[in-house]
Amino acid sequence: MPIEFYKNHIVSSANNINYIKVFESSSTSGIGISSHYVYDLSFYFKTAQNCFTNFYGDIKNFTFRFLLPSYIERGNSSLIYMANDFLKISGKGSFYQKNFDKLYNDLNDDLKKGNRVVLLGVSFALLDFAKKYNFDLSKIIIMETGGMKGRRKEITRQELHDFLKKQFNTEKVHSEYGMTEIFSQAYSKGDGIYNCVPWMKVITTEPGDPFALQKIGKTGRINIIDLANIYTCCFLSTSDIGRVYDDNSFEVLGRIDNSDIRGCSLFFE
């Protein structure tokens, strides 16, 4: 099913069940927001927890520093619900709007104490933070979660990662791949290569033909199978372009409506 259906339809497989929450996307493209009707919030939390622990281990072992100013402004962001749940489980960490000074001090304190830290931020905010502070975060997991187009001049994900690695003296920048329309998240531990949990799978098709599967390693439209979408739709065709590899990992190269798919464009001015 085209993911755009979430913008103008109620997508639901639940009969006679009242939804309890609606997750909403941003509207950076100007063509409306996506709405995901949630019938079991605890199931979303459980799914997000299992996705994270599958790749990183027990949430209780981490301190979370969330730099998500644009998402905090939206009360119905699934990412904010996930972040709040992680903070509740961990009991360690905080949100930051644009209080970079406090984030800088807290991270330095974490380093002194030897805390295991995940610094998860929206891309433009991490970029701003890195421009202001140049210090060693090699012992901290730095994780970006995508773009918020309309904030900066055009830059690819690779360029973003290269800058963050230089400013923070780290070898890898991690990434989280999720969206309003699905319950699960894929994670990358570096180099822009994502891996899925066992109940999630990515396949690619030819951009103009949803029934023509692309060969392994060939660029195509990203389609997501997320079996955690038990109350909505488990089989979604996105507007992202990418490649899938032999080990079922994948990378995101850009948008289907972007003529330049050599990199994932994150910012526009």
Image (cartoon, rainbow, N blue to C red):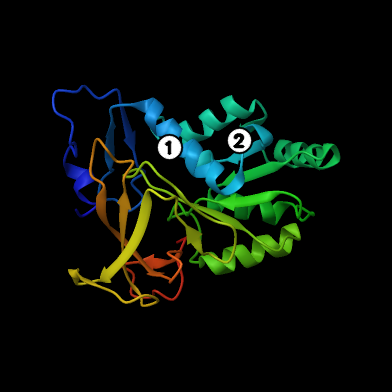
Q: Is residue 169 left or right of residue 164?
A: right
Query: Height in image: 251 above or below 237?
Result: below
Number of numbered discs overlaid on the protein picture: 2
The tag on residue 127 is: none
User: Which of the two labelled residues, at mark 1 and mark 2, occupies the earlier sequence position?
Assistant: 1
Residue shown at the point (56%, 32%) measured from the top left: 86
Query: Height in image: 173 above or below 73?
Result: below
Q: Quadrant of residue 167?
A: bottom right
Q: Amino acid at mark 2?
A: Ile
Residue 217: give x, y in percent of width and height: 40, 76
The residue at the far right in this view is 112
Can residue 98 be spotted in the picture?
no
Q: Quadrant of residue 130?
A: bottom right
Residue 77: give x, y in percent of width and height: 41, 36
Residue shown at the point (53%, 64%) measured from the top left: 192
Can residue 166 be spotted in the picture?
yes
Query: Height in image: 85 above or below 186?
Result: above
Residue 218: give x, y in percent of width and height: 36, 78
Numbered disc 1: secondary structure: helix
Mark 2 is surrounded, within 10 Å at the Cα level, by few (under 14), some (14 to 19) or many (20 or more) other residues, namely some
Residue 46: give x, y in percent of width and height: 44, 32
The tag on residue 59 is: 2
Residue hosting label 1: 47
Q: Is residue 200 left or right of residue 154?
A: left
Residue shown at the point (75%, 42%) measured from the top left: 104
Mark 1 is surrounded, within 10 Å at the Cα level, by few (under 14), some (14 to 19) or many (20 or more) other residues, namely some
